[in-house]
Image (cartoon, coloured by chain):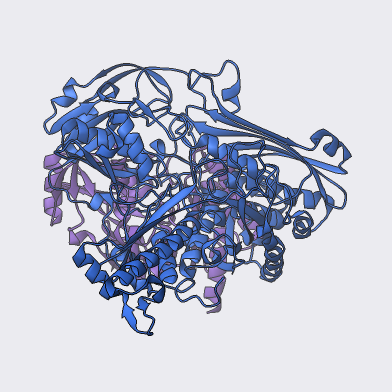
Chain colours: A purple, B blue
Amino acid sequence: MQEFDFYAANTLDELLRLLAQSGGRVIAGGTDVLVQAQRGVFPASVLVDASRVRELRFIGQDGETIRIGALTTYADILASPLLRETAPALVMAAATVGAPQTRARGTLGGNIANASPAGDTLPPLLTLDATVRLVKRGGERVLPLAEVLCGPRQTCLEPGEIIHSVAFRRPSQPTGAAFLKLGNRQGMAIAVVNVAVSLPLDDDGRIAGARVALGAVAPTPVRSPRAEAVLYGQSLNDDVLERAAQAVLYDIAPITDVRGSADYRRKAAVRLTARALRLAAQQIREGAQA
Amino acid sequence: MPAELKTVGKAELRKDAWDKVTGRAAYVDDLPREGVLVGAVVRSPHHHARIVAIETAAARNVPGVVAVLTAADVPGSKTFGPLVQDQPALAFDVVRHMGEPVALVIAQSKEAARHGVAAVQVTYEPLPAVHDPVAALEPDAPRVHSGGNLLTRYEISEGDVATGLAAADVVIEATFTVPRISPAYMEPESSMARWNDDGTLTVWVSSQKPFEDRHAIAGVLGLPEDAVQVCSAVIGGAFGGKEDSGLPVLAALGAWATRGTVRLINNRHESFLAHPKRHPARLHYTLGATREGELIALKAVVHLDTGAYASYGPAVGGLLTEMLAGAYRIPHVQVETNVVYTHSPFSGAMRGFGSPQAHFAIESMMDMLAHELSLDPLELRRKNALRPGDRLLTRVTLDRTAESLPLILDHLAAARARLAQKPPAPGRVAGVGIALGMQSMGLGYRVPDDSTNRLALAPDGSVLLYIGSPDLGQGLATAAEQIAAEALGLPYDAVRTVDVDTSVSPNGGVTCASRMTYLIGNSVMLAAQGLIAALLDYAARTLNVPRDALRYEAGAVITAAGERVALGEFASRAADEGVPLVAEATFSFPYPEETTPKHLPIGMPHVMLVFGGQAVRVEVDPELGTVTVTDVVAVHDVGQVVNRAGVEGQIEGAVAMGIGYALYESMRLKADGQWVDSFTEYLLPTAEDMPQIESVILEIPEASGPYGVKGVGEMGLVPTAPAIANAVFQATGVRAQAIPIAPEVIARPLGG
């Protein structure tokens, strides 16, 4: 176990001040930080605890925009009727993170800040075109999620900057969305591959702007523009969905590691994408019937 | 078996249950902290290296560090080991595996100890390492020990295998690979040692063998054994991994050097690297049979990776060799087992002790043969199953325990038929597989295999059971208490176990080998007779009547007039008078002449075997290759059940371990040269991965067992992994010859 200087903040202001003064890193739920600290590989020697900063723990609606505070836990996401309605893939992803204990402590902001290629909430957020609000003393900026994630375990966060919240627009059309994850066991699994899709339909019943995003198949979670292009303007049929799934192969670059080989990940990415697309399509059909 | 048992077989509550679930049980980490120094170990970052220099001055200057010890500070024997004395307390000259202890830092706090460890400067000259047991036998392979890398080789030949294979209608051949497994107990290894003013040491251990720990500690410190007292703390699981004295030895060394009290607890990373694990193995099998499925000949060549130190490797190799033909009669057998040193963390005892590796191979082969011959795998087993009177490849004659095999097969047939009815979930395919399992009880012929235990009447009329072997958490004490209560005709609550303390407890032997309830039970029954005799002697003197005018019955002495005098009255009176009412008895594992011949092809064959079998239903996702175990029906002959919840707990826990073996667990070397040594990458089955488990418990009494008891500690995991592999084959047609079964081996090709 690494040793740290430890500060605890009670308010957002205090958090930003402590971070600026100490040059430390934020700890919230600790579900990633502590695992790395146990191995002695966490890249900081000062921790600033954000878990008491209540103003960063919220799920809210602002017109057509949904906002989720960085300290919102996976369990909070699971319990949110608003997110079940507007971001079902995100809810499905939150349900697969770790164990109940992990979900009670781990936070959405932490999942982003950890920037694991396998982070489960990241593909759903990519399919929502989510933006991330970054705040530091004397400034803030809003970036698309893809620009926040710049490499395996690397974000673009500047020193003293924190993830404040995530925002996305409520889907304006009937949309099917799904998240699927392949792990090496049922419980507490890290993704070998994970996939999120969203399929909005236009008034003519054609796929408007589909989103397909995958994790653990590239240095960061990635969207698959090729798969999205295959889907664009098409009607929902299994042939299209299958062709779109095959197209993800052009947009991923998996590696071989202890959880699976590159070949297996390619195969699994295609199959999981096909299933996620069918699941999303089925949701739309069921929604139309309802 | 007596017609009516009052306590044995009843669901008595474990007396340690409340303390454990409320957190009051005192594991080593819970022992008092005041004035206790903290030990931390400097460990090798290399698989194999020469130690050029160890610089400790900087570490000694770290505030709070009390001592920094190296091999040079070891006053007695520099090495220890249960079978081969090859394991250094602290490495000298070379390190032979990653994680090997090189120096010991003793400090006033965890933080100081950690800083001390970081400040010890060891200069290494890395040397080439070998991790594969086959490659390690090449002439030019890097040497682990100067005597060469072959630790032990067993060769047995019965009949004429070449002729047998030539006569066979069908011959199948395959190589199986099984992984290195961590026991992964909840409580990692831990020990605390105190130097006493009178020049003795008291050492608390989480160990299966306090008496052997005492021997190792005394040897390393150059002390007489009676200067070392070893006490068993509450133990959070062991599974064979706590048959290693490494940590108690270091804690004792620290206490001796500082004249203080030192606690040493491995973290999980250390537990993975520096404690015994199940041997990884490669097993090459050739099996011949007639067209009708009668087994004719088996040839097997096995390489076991025992790692850097012998530990119990030679014994594991021996038992594995005995088990290579499984529960089958095969006239021509030729087997060879090589136990090989490598630069891997050492392997040793682990639940099953070689049997799980052998069974994965033979039970997979049986299904492969059935497939080749278009026979039912279950009927193939029935045709070839061992029968009473059969001679095993060890030349031991099998006794009546094999009577259970046809019954087990009947239960498996019914379970298989029932499980096959269940339709798979959409998109999945389902399959049901079976496997048989055989496990030995006891340490083996010619190995001292005794257990001594003591019963003492307390002043309040209750009975103290001085158990000679620690309860590892499996409920051994509960079983022993139930047997003692039964033998004395007392209620279960009247018997209380005293934890093992080598200064007061008799030596009950190492808690291992599925033998404890059998062995302790027999010993306790003998001690109960002794205690009754002592009580009647005392009662006769006290009442001034002839001894034969009195008899004992259910907690009371009955006089000639029929008057009942409660045990408690004599107990308190004897206590007042300072008369001890105590009886101790030793039971030795029987090796009867009729089954155990004088001339044997192997050093320590086992003569008492227990049998079981499991039917497993899996669902497989054919596209992704993921396997879900949905149902396990576990059929085991355990003899008389002492405590049903305890037996079911053993079986269910073992099945979980077997599922981990089949599907998830492997401590392997990664591409970066590091071992998988954390629960992030070493996957245990979670609650979500556990199937429905139905235990079918056969109670065929063992004549030599207490009330008919056999054993159940190990065999529950023996059939699990091959039954899963066989079920996967039934579901997909893909034969997994390596475990854990990789989903990508099962998954259909892309576009398929």
- Report the side of B482 relative to A268 (left or right): left
What residue sits 49% from the left and 67% below the top? B642
Does the rendering let one see residue A190?
Answer: no
Kindly indicate the quadrant of the structure image that contains residue B40.
top left
Instruction: Give the answer, above or below, for where B209 lies relative to A52.
Output: above
Question: Residue B698, percent across and down?
Answer: 61, 67
Question: Residue B94, percent across and down?
Answer: 39, 20
Q: Nearer the viewer, residue B496 or B205?
A: B496
Instruction: Give the answer, above or below, for where B38 lies relative to B570.
Output: above
Does the rendering let one see residue B646?
Answer: yes
**What count of labels does the image hold?**
0
- Report the side of B552 relative to B143 (left or right): left
Q: Nearer the viewer, residue A84 or B476?
A: B476
Q: Nearer the viewer, residue B292 or B399?
A: B399
Instruction: Give the answer, above or below, for where B50 lies relative to A147.
Output: above
Question: Residue B640, percent across and down?
Answer: 55, 67
What residue sits 42% from the left and 43% below the top? B243
Q: Nearer the viewer, residue B130 or B149?
A: B149
Instruction: Give the answer, above or below, for where B529 lies relative to A29.
Output: below
Question: Residue B24, percent across and down?
Answer: 25, 62
The quadrant the N terminus of chain B occupies is bottom right
